[in-house]
Amino acid sequence: MEKKAQDSRKGAPHRAVPPAVGLLFSMALMNTLLYLCLDWFFISRPRSAPSSAHCPHGHFRMGQMKNCSPWLSCEELRTEVRQLKRVGEGAVKRVFLSEWKERKVALSRLTSLEMKDDFLHGLRMLKTLQSKHVVTLLGYCEEDNTILTEYHPLGSLSNLEETLNLSKYHSVNTWQHRLQLAMNYVAIIHYLHHSPLGTLVMCDSSDLPKTLSQYLLTSNFSIVVNDLDALPLVNHSSRTFVKCGHRELHGDFVAPEQLWPYGEDMPFDDDLMPSYDEKIDIWKIPDVSSFLLGHVEGSDMVRFHLFDIHKACKSQTPAERPTAREILDTYEKVLNLLRETVMSQTREML
């Protein structure tokens, strides 16, 4: 009897899991994984590369460098830096792709002695404003009129569309990443308006191409300002304002207060031209942001949500324009709102 009972237990068939249950379980698992992937994609932000922001003043770190290094001296620039080829030129300096200790770097040389004051002003700005918003200074030599900075192979913001159209960058050619770039840009303007030196105005911005050329696109798809040769100081307490250059400006890109106010019948006279403040930078933000947003899927939705703040930026009265901080806060709210909207739609689909 006992043996029969044991045989009976051994011979009892196992209950098979119905195929439908297994299929439902697999689908639930796949949906969970998809949700987690989408959550990571929409919520996480790109990691920032190591920067000189964590180095003592007068030191730098770039790329895979673990430790901070002192700015290179004249002797080090002359003996350790190998100039390769010219990659850019402006009114103040020529830029050469160069090499230092097997690392690609950018060597800037003064174009002519007539521009030396602007060159030295840009150097002083670079030295003082080192942060995550500014290209990393590696060294300089006033004797030779040279400045060494970190090299960014993606070039200036002028190349953005060309870069994002490359197949290897299609994954970052989204409204999310483009809005992040616009936020980077506004954060730089905010930093300049509240810099260690005071309120600085980005004067090299008479049109969109000129403005874009002042900024570099980094390998981790953030923005740093590169050209600091024309950053005059505004001091509201002492009623000290600025004028960007000594020539008449034209067009819709510049702020209304930058235009000659006395009509065509009166010839332009720089001595009679009124000065202005940092709100000229605010006027230009909608145009730069629109370029950065591009025309990818979702970018028009972003523009719709930014319409009110951008309309305020275009106020004819400078004092009525928002601050860069207020614009940045609005961008952040829009980014979070649209991310949550996309995630909610994704959850409903799952």
Image (cartoon, rainbow, N blue to C red):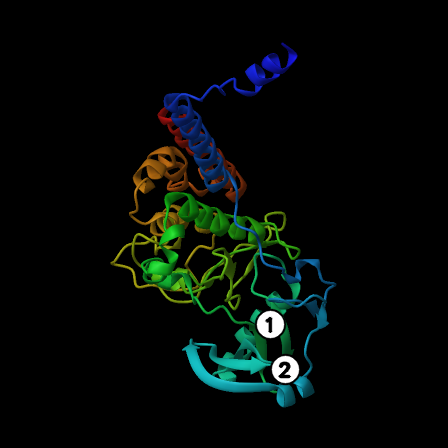
Residue closer to the observer: 162 or 203: 162
Q: CA–CA distance between discs 1 and 2?
A: 9 Å
Residue 229 x/y as whole percent:
52, 69
Q: Amino acid at mark 2?
A: Glu
The local crowd at label 1, few if under 14, some if 14 to 19, many if 20 or more residues have their Cα within 10 Å, is many
Circles 1, 2 touching at the beta carbon (< 8 Å): yes
Q: Residue furthest top?
A: 1
Res 24 quadrant in image? top left
10 displayed left or right of 41: right
Q: Residue furthest right?
A: 56
Q: Which residue is mark 1?
A: 123
Work out whether mark 1 precedes mark 2 in sequence or the reverse, and give the earlier one: 1
Give the SS element for disc 1: helix
Residue closer to the observer: 231 or 260: 231
Say which quadrant the N terminus sits in: top right
Q: Residue furthest left?
A: 265
Give the SS element for disc 2: loop
Residue 278 is at least partly visible in this image: no
Q: Which residue is mark 2?
A: 142
Residue closer to the observer: 270 or 121: 121
Residue 166 x/y as whole percent:
33, 61
Question: At 30% from the left edge and 42% from the top edge, which residue is drawn?
Answer: 297
Q: Residue furthest bottom?
A: 79
Q: Amino acid at mark 1?
A: Leu
Residue 145 is at least partly visible in this image: yes
Residue 321 x/y as whole percent:
45, 39
